[in-house]
């Protein structure tokens, strides 16, 4: 896969063999090691077909040729707003997603990903998936994850503050899972919400400290003033309230996240 990235991100990459993940930070000559597949719930989720069918109308469109292969177009339209949320082009034979487009609430195109060439092979060398650390770089333990659960009560005992859930959720969204993680010695709770297609996470800790962002803009979240930024295609909104730092991450606009965040009241 090829990505266009800003100049200051040159050399930064994440490599995973689905057992271990290495995050390379060349500026600090550091590789952060995480066993994400074993313990981390992830910031986002895979597509949940059951919830998608519950919350979206699935429409099949015409077929066309993509990357030299016959593709079937599938559109996902919100049952609540009637807005087109996502469009997929699936390889008719393998069901591989050859093109994916996501749309904002106003109908404008948000993201587009597409393969322009596909080649299937019967075997790949094992060495291709071996994770190695270049000479001169140090390995550090990344984020560690503790308990997980299906609601806030399952992880409440792991922190000294009261976990606060948003009271106003977008139509079709519900809590999928919770987790307790520790990064830099700070215990942080994650609440992950989804409607099967879109998702967002709420992170809470008791530092009352906004995350360090290279570029951000001020945003009102209820009575608080926070910061918003776009990181790797995801919107981040962070603010302090009631002695907590609350950070939300998801494929929403800053105003949409701020509206949800205003209902998080300690």
Image (cartoon, rainbow, N blue to C red):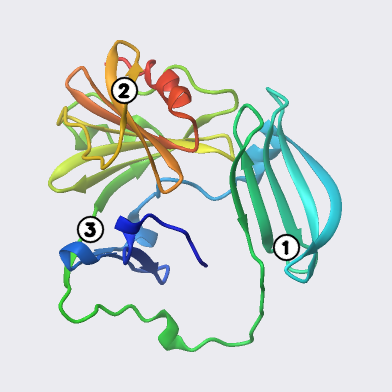
Front of the two marks 3 and 2: 3
Q: Residue at x 64, y 34 (%)?
A: 108
Residue found farthest to the front? 7
Res 192 seen here: no
SS of the residue at dot 2? Answer: loop
Q: As drawn, is 96 to the left or to the right of 185?
A: right
Q: Position of residue 56 (x, y in %)?
A: 70, 34
Q: Residue at x 24, y 54 (%)?
A: 144
Residue found farthest to the right? 62
Q: Residues within 10 Å of mark 1 (few under 14, many from 20)?
A: few
Q: As drawn, is 94 to the left or to the right of 141?
A: right
Q: Residues within 10 Å of mark 3 (few under 14, many from 20)?
A: some
Q: Position of residue 93 (x, y in %)?
A: 79, 68
Front position in the image: 228 or 201: 228
SS of the residue at dot 1? Answer: loop
Residue found farthest to the top? 223
- Mark 1 or mark 3: name the one nearer the start of the chain: 1
Q: Residue at x 62, y 42 (%)?
A: 102
Question: What residue did someone put label 2 on?
Answer: 164
Q: Which mark is residue 95?
A: 1
Front position in the image: 100 or 207: 100
Question: What residue did someone put label 3 on?
Answer: 142
Q: Which mark is residue 218?
A: none
Q: Position of residue 134 (x, y in %)?
A: 24, 79
Front of the two marks 2 and 1: 1
Res 142 seen here: yes
Q: Quadrant of the C terminus?
A: top left
Q: As drawn, is 229 to the left or to the right of 65?
A: left
- Mark 2 or mark 1: name the one nearer the start of the chain: 1
Q: Position of residue 176 (x, y in %)?
A: 47, 37
């Amino acid at each position: 896969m090829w990505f266009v990235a800003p100049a200051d991100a040159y050399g930064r990459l994440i490599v995973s063999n689905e057992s271990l993940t290495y995050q390379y930070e060349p500026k600090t000559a550091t590789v952060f090691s995480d066993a994400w597949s074993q313990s981390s719930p992830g910031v986002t989720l895979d597509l949940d077909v059951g919830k998608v069918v519950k919350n979206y109308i699935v429409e099949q469109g015409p077929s066309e040729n993509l990357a030299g292969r016959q593709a079937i177009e599938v559109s996902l339209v919100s049952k609540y707003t009637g807005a087109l949320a996502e469009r997929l082009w699936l390889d008719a034979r393998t069901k591989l997603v050859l093109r994916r487009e996501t749309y904002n609430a106003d109908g404008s195109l948000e993201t587009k990903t597409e393969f322009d060439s596909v080649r299937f092979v019967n075997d790949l060398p094992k060495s291709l998936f071996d994770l190695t650390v270049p000479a001169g770089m140090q390995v550090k333990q990344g984020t560690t994850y503790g308990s997980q659960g299906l609601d806030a009560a399952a992880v409440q005992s792991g922190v000294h503050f009261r976990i606060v859930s948003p009271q106003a959720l977008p139509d079709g969204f519900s809590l999928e899972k919770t987790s307790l993680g520790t990064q830099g010695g700070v215990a942080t709770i994650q609440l992950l919400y989804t409607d099967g297609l879109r998702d967002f996470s709420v992170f809470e800790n008791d530092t009352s400290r906004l995350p360090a962002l290279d570029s951000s803009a001020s945003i009102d979240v209820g009575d608080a003033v926070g910061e918003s930024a776009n990181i790797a295609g995801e919107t981040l909104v962070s603010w302090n309230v009631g002695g907590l730092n609350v950070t939300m991450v998801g494929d929403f606009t800053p105003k949409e996240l701020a509206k949800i965040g205003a209902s998080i009241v300690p």
